[in-house]
């Protein structure tokens, strides 16, 4: 059974940082590109970032470029998203998903809430 378990969300002030993690199991992690997707209240899902199987190719949405960094540890079957200089508009539920392209995806995690507010 495919499982994607996100963690690391929380409440942070504008300008702060968070590091999200996604623990993957039930599939061969090293063989799949992975993405981070977010969904804010009342909005559709937005692909934030993606990383290929080796980690050498990455994608960032314009809204997060220069502030977020995606990475993966294939020895730990874990995907990461380092988020710096957070803004209120980054507030959303963040999900990891299997795949590179935009939504929809076959497999998502349960999500972790990120709230940026003073």
Image: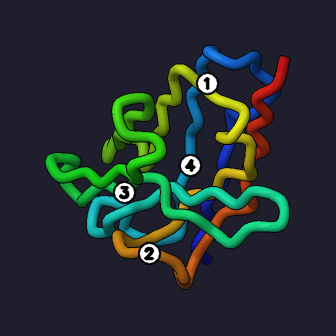
The residue identified by callout 4 is: 23
For the residue pair 12 and 75, the one nearer the viewer reads as 12
Q: Earlier in the sequence, mark 1 or mark 4?
A: 1
The residue identified by callout 2 is: 102
Q: Earlier in the sequence, mark 4 or mark 2?
A: 4
Q: As drawn, is 32 to the left or to the right of 87?
A: left
- Quarter location, residue 68: top left
Q: Quadrant of the N terminus?
A: bottom right
- Circle number at residue 18: 1
Q: Position of residue 39 (x, y in %)?
A: 70, 60
Look at the picture and state if 75 lies above or below 36. above
Q: Position of residue 95 (x, y in %)?
A: 63, 57
Q: Earlier in the sequence, mark 1 or mark 3?
A: 1
The residue identified by callout 3 is: 50
For the residue pair 118 and 100, the one nearer the viewer reads as 118
Which callout, 1 or 2, points to the residue nearer the camera? 2
Q: Quadrant of the C terminus?
A: top right
Q: Position of residue 34 (x, y in %)?
A: 39, 61
> How far apart are the two marked residues, 1 and 4, measured between alpha carbons?
16 Å
Question: Is the Cβ of the residue at disc 1 closer than 8 Å to that at disc 4?
Answer: no
Which callout, 4 or 3, points to the residue nearer the camera? 3
Which callout, 4 or 2, points to the residue nearer the camera? 2
Query: SS for tag 4?
Result: strand
Mark 1, other Cα within 10 Å: few <14 / some 14–19 / many ≥20: some
Q: Residue at x 59, y 19 (%)?
A: 17
Mark 2, other Cα within 10 Å: few <14 / some 14–19 / many ≥20: some
Look at the picture and state if 67 lies above or below 15. below
Q: Earlier in the sequence, mark 4 or mark 3?
A: 4
> How far apart are the two marked residues, 4 and 2, measured between alpha carbons?
21 Å
Q: As drawn, is 13 to the left or to the right of 100?
A: right
Mark 4, other Cα within 10 Å: few <14 / some 14–19 / many ≥20: some
């Amino acid at each position: 059974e495919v499982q994607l378990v996100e963690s690391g969300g929380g409440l942070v002030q504008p300008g702060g940082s968070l590091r999200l993690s996604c623990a993957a199991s039930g599939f061969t992690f090293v063989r799949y590109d992975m993405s981070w997707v977010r969904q804010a209240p009342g909005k559709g899902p937005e692909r934030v970032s993606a990383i290929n199987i080796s980690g050498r190719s990455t994608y960032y949405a314009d809204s997060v470029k220069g502030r977020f960094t995606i990475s993966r540890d294939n020895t730990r079957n874990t995907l990461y998203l380092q988020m710096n200089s957070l803004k209120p508009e980054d507030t959303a539920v963040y999900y990891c998903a299997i795949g590179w392209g935009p939504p929809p995806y076959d497999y998502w995690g349960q999500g972790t809430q990120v709230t940026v507010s003073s």
